[in-house]
Image: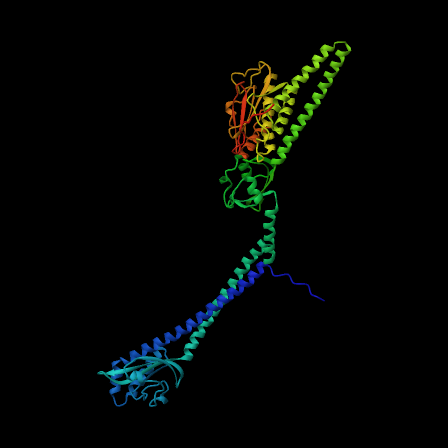
Amino acid sequence: MRLPRARPRSLAGQLFAMQVVLVAAVVAGCAFFAYASGSSQARETATRQARAVALSVADSPSVREAIRTPDPSAVLQPYAERVRKDTGIAFVTIMDPHRVRWTHPDTGQIGATFLGHTARALRGETFSETYTGTLGPSIRVVTPVRDDGRIVGLVSAGITVERVSTQVRAQLGALGLAAGAALALGGIGTYVINARLRRHTHGMNAAELSRLHDYHEATLHAVREGLLMLDGQRRIALINDAGRELLGLAPGTVGRRVTELDLPAPLTGALLASEERVDEVHLTADRVIVVNTRPVVGGERRGTVVTLRDHTELQALSGELDSERGFTQALRSQAHEAANRLHTVVSLIELDRSEEAVGFATAELELAQALTDRVVGAVAEPVLAALLLGKAAQANERGVELVLADDSLIDDGVLPASLPQRDLVTVLGNLIDNAVDAASEAVARPPDAVPAQRTPPPRRPARARVTVTALAGDGELLLRVADNGAGVDPADAAEVFRRGWSTHGAGRGIGLALVQQAAHRNGGAVTLERGADGGAEFTVRLALPDGSGARRGRTT
C-alpha cells in the first residue's frame, strides 16, 4: 500500500529549522574561535610570564655574586624556589654555560645536565621554546647571565603545558556556559519570531505561498472590475490594471497618497471616507464609475478596499433608453393627434365641406414635411438627423418649438469613424433635453413668479423655443443649443457641469456632467454663455481630423 505523501513543512517551520541551525553554527563557530584564541592567548601569556621571570633572575646582582662562589647551588637553590613560588611558574633553573644545573624544583636533578636547547642563549639571545623536560612538556624561556660582558651562566624559566591546558579548560567551561546560554536565547527568540510568522502566513509552506502569489497576480490582471487597496496612511498599496484604466492613472502609482492623484474632489472624498460606501456613482474625466469602499479593521484602521465598476456604457444606454422612451411617447401622442385630425377631416367631408377638409389635412402635412426637409437638408449625418427629428417631436408635444439654425450644415461622411455616434447622441440629446425643460418652464411660470436667487425676475417668453446649431467646418464639429428660458445664474456657471447639480431636485444633475465628459473624451470642450434670446447657450466644439469638416457643394 502506498503511503500518503507528507505535507511539506510550513514556511515558518522551515525558517525555524534554518535559523536554529544557523544560530547553532554561529555559536559553535564563536566558541571554537574563542577556544582557539584563548588557547593561543594562554600560551602567549605563559611565555611572557616565563620571559619576565627569566630576565629578572638573570639580571639579579645576587645571582652573579652566587655564581662566583665555590658552591653556587647553596645560594641559588633557595633563591630560585622562592622566585618560583612567588611567581607561580613551574620551574626556575639556573645552570652553568655547560648546562649543568645549579637549581631545580626537584633537588635530585641538581648537578644533572639541563634538557633543552642553549646554543642561542650562549650566543647572547633570549628565546622561548616548547620542550619536554623532567617535568614534562613545558613552555620555557632561556636567557644568558652576563658578568662584565662574559656569559657566566644560563637561566631557564617555564610553565608546564599541562598547567596552561588546565587554565584553558577552565576558560572553556565558562565559554561553554556562555555558548549554551546564547544558543538557548537564540532558539527562544527564533521560536517567538517564527510563531508570529506562522500566524501571518497561516501555516502555509513556500510552495503554497508561491502558488497563492501566482493566483493573486493572475486574478488582479484577469478581473475586469477595478480593485484598489489603501493602507492606513491613505496610500495606494495595490491597484490592478482595470483600476488604473478606470481612474486614468499611470503605472507607478503604488505608494502615492490618494490626495496626490488629481482625481475629482467627490471621488477623492469617497476614497478617503472612513465609513463604508455602497454603489456610489462618480465621474472622472472620461468615465462614469460605481464606487464601493470597505474599511479593513483589525484592532486599528489598517486600510480600505475599494472596488470600481465602469458605469459609462450603462449610463449611455440609460440615456438612449430614455430617448427611446421619449420617442415612443411622442409617437403615441402623434398617433392620438393624427386620429383626431383624421376624424376632423372625415367629419368635414360628411358635412360636405371638402375644401376645408383638404386645406386642414395639407396644412399639417406641409408643416411636418417642412421640418423634415430642413433637418435632412442641413444635417446629412443620419444619427444626428434622426435625433433632431425625434427631439423636435418631443419638444412639440411639450409646446416647445425646436428650430435648426440657418447656418447648420453637416455633410454625410464628414464625421470620422473615430468619433463615437453614442457620444454625439449623449452630447446633443442631453443639451436639447435641458433646453426644452428650461424653455417650457419659462413659458409655464406665472408672471409674478420670482425665483429667490434671481434679481430682477426673468422675463416670461411668449413662445418656448430651442435653437440648435450643428456645423462641421474649419476642422471642428460645433454643436450649439440655445433656449429662451430663464438662463443660468452666473453664480452657478462653474457648477452646472458638476455631477448632482440640478434645479429639478434630487436624482437629477448628471446630464451636463456626461456632456462635459463626452466632450473631454473626444478632445473637445463645452462652454456656457448667455444666448441671444436671454436663455442659456451651450456650445460644444470637437476637433476633427485634417480634411474633415470642410464645406462641400451639395446637389439638390
Across and down, in percent, residue 356 comes to 71, 10
Across and down, in percent, residue 523 comes to 52, 34
Across and down, in percent, residue 188 comes to 53, 61
Residue 507 in view: no
Across and down, in percent, residue 393 comes to 65, 22
Please determine whether, in this image, residue 277 is positioned above or below residue 49: above
Report how many numbered discs are placed on residues in the image.
0
Position of the C terminus by quadrant: top right
Apparent side of residue 420 relative to residue 96 in the rendered image (left or right): right
Q: Nearer the viewer, residue 112 or 283?
A: 283
Please determine whether, in this image, residue 273 is positioned above or below residue 394: below
The residue lying at 34 percent from left, 78 percent from top is 50
The residue lying at 71 percent from left, 13 percent from top is 358
Residue 537 in view: yes
The residue lying at 32 percent from left, 77 percent from top is 51
Task: Residue lying at the far left in this picture: please name it.
Answer: 148
Q: Nearer the viewer, residue 432 or 505?
A: 432
Q: Nearer the viewer, residue 229 or 299?
A: 229
Apparent side of residue 379 relative to residue 73 in the rendered image (left or right): right
Q: Nearer the viewer, residue 10 or 461?
A: 461
Apparent side of residue 522 relative to residue 32 in the rendered image (left or right): right
Task: Residue lying at the far top in this picture: please name it.
Answer: 352
Task: Residue lying at the far front in this picture: please name it.
Answer: 555
Report which quarter residue 76 is drawn in: bottom left
Rendering colour mode: rainbow
Position of the N terminus by quadrant: bottom right
Please determine whether, in this image, residue 185 is positioned above or below residue 478: below
